[in-house]
Image (cartoon, rainbow, N blue to C red):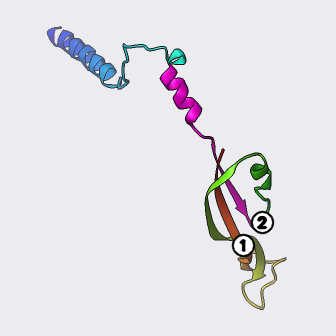
Amino acid sequence: MNKIKIFIKSLNIFFLLLLLSSCNGKFNFNKINKQNDPLVNSQKSNTKDKLEIAISCNEESIEKYLKDGWKIKNKKSKEKVCSWKSVPANNSCDIEKDKGCKIIKPDSFGTETIYLLEK
């Protein structure tokens, strides 16, 4: 009977420690109303909107963004496969009858341009 009480007490301590160890949040007891703080409001008005646009294989352009007042801050380009084609693996292969002999290869290449826009 004594061993059961000790086991139950140790089990309760274990669950209490488990509960306390799982709480890792920060507690802020100094609550400040940030909506009326002029310093925070002035910092919000100075931030700029940023937008990242990726254009692949000349699918579209960024002209509508530039007309809307966005400016290009950064531009990166890299080569990308625009389309793929299926070809037979060898001369005796029929793609329509034997799907296992079909190889997919790049058909055309283009560029992918990533624009970082700022307003």
For badge 1, the amino acid type reads Gly
Q: Magenta stretch: residue 7 in it?
A: no
- Rendered residue at 38%/24% (across/down): 25
| Quarter of the rendering occupied by the N terminus | top left
Q: Is residue 98 left or right of residue 36?
A: right
Q: Is residue 98 left or right of residue 80?
A: right
Compared with 85, 66 (above or below) is above
Q: Which residues make up the magenta segment?
A: 38-57
Residue at the far left in the pictured view: 2
Label 1 neighbour load within 10 Å: few <14, some 14-19, many 20+: some
**Which dot marks residue 110?**
1
Q: Magenta stretch: residue 51 in it?
A: yes
- Considering only order in the chain, which callout, 1 or 2, is on the residue closer to the N terminus? 2
Q: Nearer the viewer, residue 87 or 27?
A: 27
For badge 2, the amino acid type reads Asn
Residue behind mark 2:
58
Q: Is residue 86 left or right of residue 78?
A: right
